[in-house]
């Protein structure tokens, strides 16, 4: 037969899952660090949830992404929260900084 190097399907699936988990961890860490950099007053001025709430949501999201606890739906909700922060809240906060 062949002399090629082929991974079994289960190994490929494991590597894809690992890659996705790592990418989501990077997104969540980036969102958390970004949230920490803005002042609490910026969140109020942008008419968004307060800084403590966003940092708590994003911090718990990072924690659940790192821990091997199978809490799928909660992790999914916190992943969506990270994307909402990056797509909606972060641009609003950055817009306030540019206007000054």
Image (tube, rainbow, N blue to C red):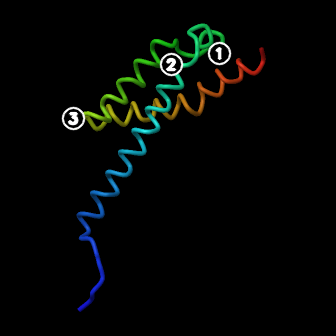
Tell me how far mark 2 sits from mark 3, CA to CA: 25 Å
Q: Is residue 52 above or below residue 80?
A: above
Between disc 2 and disc 3, the foreground one is 2
Secondary structure at numbered mark 1: loop
Secondary structure at numbered mark 3: loop
Q: Residue at x 51, y 13 (%)?
A: 51
Secondary structure at numbered mark 2: helix
Quadrant for residue 94, please give it: top right
Q: Earlier in the sequence, mark 1 or mark 3?
A: 1
**Mark 2, residues whose alpha carbon is within 10 Å: few (<14), some, or many (≥20)?**
some
**Mark 3, residues whose alpha carbon is within 10 Å: few (<14), some, or many (≥20)?**
few
Residue indicated by mark 3: 69
- In this view, the residue in front, 2 or 49, is 2
Residue indicated by mark 2: 36
Residue 37 in the image: state x and y as whole percent. Answer: 55, 19
Quadrant for residue 40, please give it: top right
């Amino acid at each position: 037969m062949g002399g090629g190097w082929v991974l079994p399907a289960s190994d490929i699936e494991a590597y894809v899952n690992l890659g996705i988990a790592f990418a989501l961890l990077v997104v969540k860490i980036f969102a958390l660090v970004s949230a920490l950099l803005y002042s609490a007053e910026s969140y109020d001025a942008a008419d968004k949830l307060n800084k403590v709430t966003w940092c708590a949501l994003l911090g718990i999201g990072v924690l659940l992404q790192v821990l091997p606890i199978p809490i799928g739906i909660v992790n999914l909700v916190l992943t969506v929260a990270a994307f909402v922060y990056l797509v909606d809240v972060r641009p609003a906060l950055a817009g306030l900084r540019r206007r000054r």
